[in-house]
Image (spheres, rainbow, N blue to C red):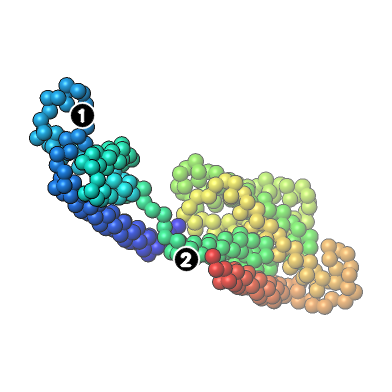
Amino acid sequence: RYTAAERRAMLEEVQRRQAEREAARQAEAQAEEDRFRSYRDREYGRSPAVTPSAAPQPTPAARSSQTPAAADETRTISIPKRRTAEPAEPAAHAVQPPAPAAQPAQQPTQVMPPVQKAAPAAPAAPTPAEHTAHPEPTPAPKSKKASASRSYAAAEAALNERIRADHIWLSNPVLVRGLGMAPVIGAALDGRRALMLCIASLILVTFTRVLAVAICHLTKNRFRPVVYCYSAALLYIPTYVLLYALFGSDLTLLGIYLPIMVVEPAIVKRMEFSDLEPVRDAFRHGFNNALGMCVVLLIVGCLRELLATGAVFGNVILHNALLPLAALPAGGFVIVGILAAIWCAAANLYTDYKHEEVRRLYADRKH
């Protein structure tokens, strides 16, 4: 995951190294050619008579019929072929200067075999085309810096994703994101009503999202708002039947706030996203959102019942009502506002601490 500036810098570095290697290779080849020419000139000028003996002679018949001029031409053509096939280091050994003039005339015959022996050696250094086919890895200093920045960015992104996915505490749909406030304030007056709303939220928010995403996969993500609305309306009927079987006539205490769950903002907000998530992710995200709503519903419902009547789920805890206003919608606004302020402050402190911890961790890292 390189940025455009990093890719451009890496390309420039690779091109610069290729140019340096090409210049060094050309200089070495030129020096080798100069050394070979000087050696050849000295060898021809000193004892041209022994030149035919150094040339390769395939057969005795060809050797007897070959003239000195043809032998000289054969030597002149064969030596450059051997030179171009030599590697850089063996060539330096092959072109060493000849022995002093005091040696016998057979000495050039002893000097040339190393040249013939080095002929079948490996090819020379790769050409620029061969080198560009296998580009060199990224330079070490720049790769370390880029790796450190990518690692910090990846850690920061992973932390933000964990914070966003925590729908219970750090990204609660009600207290942090402000979704679904109407049922919490208007209907969660005690623990029993909060429990009924919890079950309705778990069923509607979770399975509406799963059903809508599955249908959108079949329709290629067409008519997304209509699919989400009709999915919630379709699931409301079995949800109402299930709640009536569990709580009976007490279900009427919720009033209009149970049908209003069909257009719950936690469901409708999903229509804003143009991307289509997998069904498994839809179930996980929907269940996490519903669970975050359930936590707030139970906390607010039990707290309002305790402050208004001194009891929780009908069990008397306090004999005096501390805040009778908590049983009214106005008291619900006050309680939810105070709870949201404390909740968000604690969540922001925790997220700031985690971000600072990531920055400190990658700031102290030297490699």
Is residue 290 shown left or right of residue 66?
right
Instruction: Looking at the picture, tell me which residue is in the foreground, 312 or 90.
Output: 90
Assess disc 2: are there few (<14), some (14-19) or many (≥20) residues with their C-alpha within 10 Å of its C-alpha. Answer: few
Residue 164, percent from left and from top: 59, 62
Residue 105, percent from left and from top: 21, 41
Q: Which residue occupies 85% across, 68% down? A: 311
Instruction: Looking at the picture, tell me which residue is in the foreground, 135 or 85.
Output: 85
Question: How far apart are labels 2 and 1 at the CA level?
Answer: 62 Å
Q: Total marks drawn? A: 2
Q: What's the residue type where badge 2 is placed?
A: Lys
Residue 338, percent from left and from top: 69, 76
Q: Quadrant of residue 365?
A: bottom right
For label 1, the residue is: 57
The C terminus appears in which quarter of the rendering? bottom right
For label 2, the residue is: 145
Element type at marker 1? loop
Residue 8, percent from left and from top: 35, 61
Is residue 77 shown left or right of residue 24?
left
Label located before the other in sequence (2 or 1): 1
Q: What's the residue type where badge 1 is placed?
A: Gln
Looking at the image, residue 308 lies above or below residue 91: below
Q: Which residue occupies 27% across, 54% down? A: 28
